[in-house]
Image: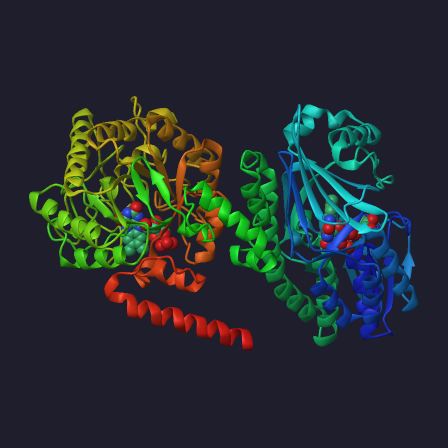
Amino acid sequence: MKVAVLGAGPAGLYFAISMKRRNPAHEITVFERNRPDDTFGWGVVLSAETLDNLAANDAVSAAWIREYFAYWDDIAVFHKGVRTVSTGHGFCGIGRKRLLLLLQRRARDLGIELVFESEIADPQPLMASHDLVISADGLNSHSRATFAEVFKPDIDVRKCKFVWLGTRQKFDDAFTFIFEETEHGWVWAHAYQFEPETATFIVECSEETWAAWGFGDMNRKQSIAACEQIFAGHLGGHRLISNAGHLRGSAWINFPRVLCERWSHKNLALLGDASASAHFSIGSGTKLALESAVALADYLHSEPSLEAAFDRYESARRTEVLRLQSAARNSLEWFEDVERYLDLDPVQFNYSLLTRSQRISHENLRLRDPEWLGGAEAWFQHRSGNTDNVRRAPMFAPFQLRDLKLKNRVVVSPMAQYKAVDGCPTDWHFAHYAERAKGGAGLIYIEMTCVSPEGRITPGCTGFYAPEHEIAWKRLVDFVHAETETRICAQIGHSGPKGSTQLGWQQSDAPLATGNWPVMAASDVPWSPANQVPKPMDGADMARVRDEFVASAEMAARCGFDMLEIHAAHGYLLSSFITPLTNRRTDDYGGSLENRMRYPLEVFHAVRAAWPAEKPISMRISANDWVGDEGVTPAEAVEIARLLQAAGVDICDVSAGQTSVWARPVYGRMFQTPFSDRIRNETGIATMAVGNIYEPDHVNSILLAGRADLVCLARPHLADPYWTLHAAVQLGDRDVKWPDPYLAGRDQLYRLAERSATMGLKV
Ligand SMILES: Cc1cc2nc3c(=O)[nH]c(=O)nc-3n(C[C@H](O)[C@H](O)[C@H](O)COP(=O)(O)OP(=O)(O)OC[C@H]3O[C@@H](n4cnc5c(N)ncnc54)[C@H](O)[C@@H]3O)c2cc1C
Ligand SMILES: Cc1cc2nc3c(=O)[nH]c(=O)nc-3n(C[C@H](O)[C@H](O)[C@H](O)COP(=O)(O)O)c2cc1C
């Protein structure tokens, strides 16, 4: 086959080598616009595992690379003058120039023609003269631009500015992150040694800080001098060096995240950064390029046609690319938002940095560096006021709000049971909630309990509006207090535009077949075209419903509930005021956020005045309507939380969505936790995270990274009322309290867990 490769970066060279290894008869030419030893950048990070994969493909080049590998195990973080080190991370790296020179040598040995200083602006003539053209021409690929209509590139230019520098200062004991506060804002560096005499030193900052420093108007020399001044304390008198001499300008760039819808056209395929890029902070761009090169060479030999080979290449590599891009996105967003975390204690800041991509979990960190993690856990317990047994997972740290003391951070999220009769809880509710209270969580919620018969979502919803409701709820609260250490929270709400609908397991949110009651809301916007048009509330309606909230809170107080939550999320009545999607009012209760929050806050203030001063109140909000700028965005949710905080709300329960049938949520593990993280770390209000959190590892990492103060789990508690007790067994924590009659079951479970752990070790 006659093959042209555009670009002699890692992708192009390694593809050429992999092709020749599979069939020496291929005639391969690599065209590169630069000279053989012109290269931007310094070191690249790979892993031992990646190198093993490469050895299976071409043992010769892998052995050469291995010879030059620098290894380091530690990550050091300089923050607020404190250097924190953790170990067990296992990186290896090599100079980019060294890697390319080795690959060039290997390519030449295999008979590949390398043509340097040859810029290919248009791939089409090569497509006509060659059987196969591979465009490995990097982030700004010309071929990708030539066939943009086919490849449909999605290029997301990220917010931070960075410049890839080097230094002779040694960073040979650890991969080092340095955060420096300057008069123009924070600037940070990613530094690692890749050769005995040289280390990579990538300097990064926000666009605002970059502008305030005037980096845009500086030439390269001035830029470097400014960076030397910023990091003088870490450079030991060494210079920062740029080897991007062949590039124009100051060499600062914004990282472009590239992803193409298609990677091939006729006899041309995109490879490496040209097809998909991964942010440098997870060090996977070169790995991705090399592994894709191997896969493409494989399929070109295993498949009967170019088309079939390209199809397999795209489908096999796309999954891996998306996986890495998702981790890279988490990581780069962490750096983009780092100013949010810089006030954290150095221990928590370090933990947050290490877990930023969500690829490293709490237990994974324990495997890497048990001592460091143990210290971080002890720090968390101390800070939570626990001085007895500090070697416990964060989920078992106590938490206090006003006089309410929770024994741990696990919360059974509110979940409607749809089993009430005329608003009255039944034996079902008693049995259901009593089981969850025995299950070890620090706090359990009862479902959204409605302030009036019309305020119910369905005919099966519970209420706080009739004397028999009070008797039934009090019986439950008394049981929880008498038999467990768990605390119990009442969630009160009004269904608004989503009222008069079917039970959860019927057609959810659809009107009743018969017996509908009239509904009201902020404006006359129905939940869906099938639902009733609600009556826009007038002043009298608002005063009446506010008083119903107060009466319900008073009933909850008489029942002895430990905490109260006002439901202002999920499209129900108060939520219908907050979101602009359903609030079309032109009076003082519509328009600006301040106006849209006016009624929910009036309700809060009235309830607060009636609720015992020593007990906390939470508000649940939808922090994202998932419809883009038309609705509530995570940024606006921060402003909502600020208003709640100023009003005296003790904790914000950060949920999302269910406010519009047009919402397009992006689901995934812990998918709503970033909203809680943002609110907590930008406003300082305590938060609860909720949404697809189901493993002890999730809970622990959310808490220790400071993304929430409490963690709510809903569906996991439907499947397992004893989720917390079982989590303790899984983590080997014996300090949780089981109900006395169940002790024999507890002992057996710990024994079985120990036995399977031992068997696991023997395997
Ligand atoms: C600051 C920074 C730090 C990074 N750190 C790491 C790291 O630690 N670990 C890691 O794995 N990855 C890292 N990367 C990513 C890594 O450099 C790339 O993902 C990787 O180089 C991709 O290889 P490639 O061959 O596709 O592209 P490139 O390495 O960009 O190679 C493309 C080649 O094509 C040539 N070329 C471009 N256009 C033409 C043309 N028209 N005609 C002829 N030749 C052309 C270019 O000169 C270049 O030599 C980093 C990237 C940056 C920007
Ligand atoms: C059956 C069921 C009923 C729910 N009822 C309520 C409710 O009454 N009030 C509320 O705020 N959220 C309610 N939710 C939402 C949960 O509290 C939680 O926010 C959501 O299920 C996401 O958490 P999870 O992924 O742990 O299930 C309910 C969820 C389920 C599954």
Farthest residue toward the top? Answer: 588
Q: Is residue 28 above or below residue 565?
A: below
Q: Position of residue 683 (x, y in %)?
A: 45, 31
Q: Is residue 512 left or right of residue 673?
A: left
Residue 591 visible (yes or no): no
Task: Count the marks.
Answer: 0
Query: Dividing the image into 4 quarters, which one contains the N terminus?
Result: bottom right
Residue at 53%, 55% in the rendered image = 361
Q: Is residue 739 left or right of residue 177?
A: left
Query: Dividing the image into 4 quarters, which one contains the C terminus?
Result: bottom right
Q: Is residue 11 above or below residue 673?
A: below
Residue at 9%, 43% in the rendered image = 466
Farthest residue toward the front? Answer: 388
Instruction: State the residue in front, 382 or 460.
Output: 382
Residue 430 visible (yes or no): yes
Q: Position of residue 543 (x, y in %)?
A: 18, 27
Q: Is residue 663 left or right of residue 335?
A: left
Q: Quadrant of residue 247?
A: top right
Q: Is residue 373 left or right of residue 128?
A: left
Instruction: State the residue in front, 25 or 10.
Output: 10
Instruction: State the residue in front, 733 or 45.
Output: 733
Q: Quadrant of residue 417?
A: bottom left
Q: Position of residue 464 (x, y in %)?
A: 15, 42
Q: Position of residue 491 (x, y in %)?
A: 25, 43
According to the image, what is the colour scheme of the structure?
rainbow
Q: Is residue 710 above or below residue 9?
A: above
